[in-house]
Structure formats: C-alpha cells, structure tokens
Image (cartoon, rainbow, N blue to C red):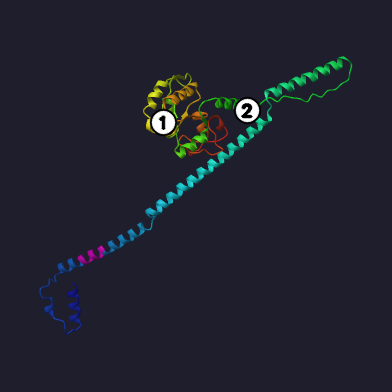
Amino acid sequence: LSGVLCGHRGREGGDPGWSASGLTGMDASLRSLLEAGAEIAREQQNVIDVQLSREYVANWTEGPSAEEIRSRRSMERKMADANSAALEAAEEARLASIRARAEEAAARSRSAEARAAEDDARRALMEASRRAKEEGVDLSIAVGASAREPDPEDVKREATAAEEDALPWRVIDAIDCYRSLKEGVAVLLDVRPRKDHDREAIKGSLSAPAADLSGGISDRVVTPNLDNMASRVAKLTDELKGKTVVVVGDGEPYVRDAIRALRVTIGEEVAEMRGGQVAWLKYYTPAGKPRPRYVGYGKDNEETFWTASN
C-alpha cells in the first residue's frame, strides 16, 4: 500500500524518477488495498494491547513484595509477643501485691493462743469490776481488749497452705505452670473425666481420665477409674519423658489419688496445678492467651464484659 501511495504522489508531482514499471507484479485492486488496511489496523491493535499489558504489570508490581509481607508479619508477631509479655508482667505485679497484702494481714492477725489470753484477761477484768461494785468500791475499769474475728479468706488460705505443705509433691499455681510450658520443661496431664476434657481443655494438655462422668448437669456423678488412667499413661511414655508432669484436675478427691498412683507408675516428677482447670481459666484462655487484668472468669466476672478476643 505504501508503495502504491508513494508511486501515486511521485507521478502527480512530476518526479522524474517515478516509473510505472515499479508496480509491475503488484495487485493494486480495491480488495487488496482493503486487506492491507485491515492488516495495518490489526498491527496497531497489537501494539496497543502490548502497551496496556505492560501498564497492568507495572501496576501489579507496585504492591508489597513477598519480603515486605514477611517483614510485616514478623513485626506483628513481635508486637503480639510484647503485648503478651506486658500482660504477664502486669499480672505478676498484681499477684505480688496480693501476696504482700496477705502476708501483712497474716502478720497483723493474732494466733489462737493470743486471742485466748486476751479473752481470759478481759473476763478477769470484768470479774474484778463486778466484785469491786459488790464491795461498794467505785472502780471504773476500761476494758479495751478485743478479739477481731479473722477474715474467712485468710483462714481458708492458711488451711490450704498447711495442707499443701504436708503433701509429698509440689503444688504450683497456674502462672508457674504457664512459664514451665513456655520453657518446655513441663507437660499438662488432664485427669478429669473425658467429657469434661472434650468440653473445654487447655491447649496441648494430654487427657488421661482418672474418673468417669455420668448423669446430667443436675445429677452429675463422678466415679474414680484409676485403671483407665494407668492404661492411657502407658501410651504417653514418649510425651511425658524428661518433663515435669503437672496434673490438671477439678478439685475432686480422686485427683490426688491419681497423683499418688502416677508417682508410683512413672519415673518423672509429678506436680499438681493449684486450683486445677478453674484456676488456669482465671488467668489464661484455654488456648493459653493471658487474660487482661480487669477480666475475671465465672463468678469473678460479674461486673465485666466479654469480647470476641476473650
């Protein structure tokens, strides 16, 4: 087509170099010209498509790279770990404050012997005052001794501590259990009935039911079954080897019977989680995430609210 057009211009312009012989063998019909024009249009469309493709690719490559995505995710994990550490530190500070107040209250509280001595002194003073009045002696005696009733929570705490001290195995709280799990030196063995474990359990805990559960919510019946626990523990030798076995229970008497049996059957150290599953859920979720300091669990959560993050 270009040759035809060039030849046409050369002829009209009087170009002496133009010769009709240059068109020899070329099809200059209208149909050929239209096909040549359509071919040019297709080539131009191809050029446009290639340019658009390059622009699309350029836009795609402007997004974050795989390395940037990995870096961002790593930063998010570090921030989450930092938040978890901050929550743990706050919880430890709160517990330390509670322990300090409890120790101070215990120091202020008097022993049973001291209270008895105060009662005897008060009765003696009152008797002396009565006799003085009978004898006509005007004697005013100010009886200032008083015996303060001990706090029931303090009494319960002291009784529990004395009971734990008499046990031949360690009793550790949920926070110490959490640290041991993080360090990889302990494993949790859930001896509650299988139904309770399936309903709610600490992530990573191993189930070895030492009791069977029957009945419903209103007529719950727990029947000890230490043989079942022993057969299950025999299959968990590799998981328990070389670690402190922390028993998770529900406060029932069979739990400590299970611990006594475990101390005989396995060669690892066996400890007891103070308060069992309920105590764990006061400080951590079943998945092991520390709870915010202001969020309680169960009856301790009456004045707080739940969110999806809990």
Q: Residue at x 58, y 26 (%)?
A: 162
Say the numbered circle drawn on residue 206. 1
Label 2 environment density (alpha carbons within 10 Å; few <14, some 14–19, many ≥20): some
The reply to whether residue 180 is visible in this rendering is yes
N-term-proximal mark, 2 vs 1: 2
Say the numbered circle drawn on residue 154. 2
Q: Which residue occupies the foreground of this view, 250 or 171? A: 171
Cα distance in 3D space between marks 2 and 1: 34 Å
The reply to whether residue 192 is visible in this rendering is no
Image quadrant for the N terminus? bottom left
User: Is residue 39 covered in magenta?
Assistant: yes
Q: What span is colored magenta in the figure?
A: 38-46
Apparent side of residue 167 relative to residue 188 in the rendered image (left or right): right
Image quarter for residue 203?
top left
Image coordinates of residue 266 in percent, x first then y, are 42, 27
Give the residue furthest to the top.
134
Image quarter for residue 36?
bottom left
Give the residue furthest to the left.
25
Mark 1 residue element:
strand
Q: Which residue occupies the foreground of this view, 162 or 45? A: 162
**Residue type, label 1:** Leu
* Secondary structure, magenta segment, majority class: helix
Label 1 environment density (alpha carbons within 10 Å; few <14, some 14–19, many ≥20): many
Q: Residue at x 47, y 48 (%)?
A: 78
User: Is residue 128 covered in magenta?
Assistant: no
Q: Which residue occupies the foreground of this view, 88 or 63? A: 88
Image coordinates of residue 169 in percent, x first then y, are 50, 28
